[in-house]
Amino acid sequence: MAHLSWAILLTILSCTGCVEQRPDDALEPNDTLEDATEITIGIPIEARANQGNSDVFKIEVDADEILSIDLVSLGKENCPGFTLIDPSAQVLFKDASARCRRIGQPEIHDAAVEFQINGEDYFFQTETTVSGYYYFTITEGRDADNILSYSWDYRLTVTVE
Ligand SMILES: [Ca+2]
């Protein structure tokens, strides 16, 4: 009987899905391009990236504009990876690793995309060459040994000039 109890306890402790995750934001589900949250230009969105659950946003833009994506950290584990795709489905930016810390270069970083890390915050800017929907994805990273699911709160503002 004692062995059975230990077995149950170990199962609970080692079951990653059993560890409670911080609640998702009201924008869910937005894990895929099909379910992307549409951004209104100039209107900030406050949202939460939970580990294992990407946040996908779509932004309708004309060609020959300056598209800026501004991310301000609002706390918790600041571990985001980013992807930016243009309306012709070309990947302009893609982080290489799902690990928490930003190590090394992105897997894809088109020369037309400016990317800045400003302390805890992030900034993208690019001149649009195609009109239509740009897709911007935030994926919360992880560490090899994190037990509790990581979670990052952020404010996203998109502007077009
Ligand atoms: Ca999501």
Image: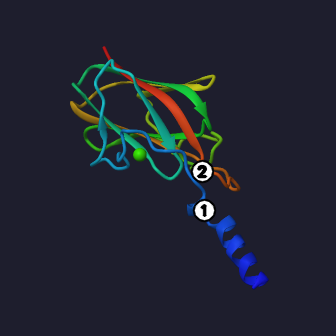
State the residue position of label 1.
16
Q: Residue 104's quadrant in the figure?
A: top right
Q: Under 8 Å from ligand 1: the CB of mark 2?
A: no
Tag shown at residue 149: 2
Residue 19 shown left or right of residue 125 in the figure? right
Tag shown at residue 115: none
Q: Under 8 Å from ligand 1: the CB of mark 1?
A: no
Amino acid at circle 1: Thr
Residue 2 shown left or right of residue 117 in the figure? right
Disc nearer the start of the sequence (2/1): 1
Secondary structure type for disc 1: helix
In the rendered image, residue 152, in percent from the top left (x then y), is placed at 55, 37
Residue 67 shown left or right of residue 70 in the figure? left
**Quarter of the figure that contains the N terminus:** bottom right
- Viewer-nearest residue: 147 or 55: 147
Contact between marks 2 and 1 (CB within 8 A): the answer is: yes
Residue 132 shown left or right of residue 84 in the figure? left
Figure label count: 2
- Viewer-nearest residue: 127 or 13: 13
Amino acid at circle 2: Ser
- Viewer-nearest residue: 102 or 22: 22
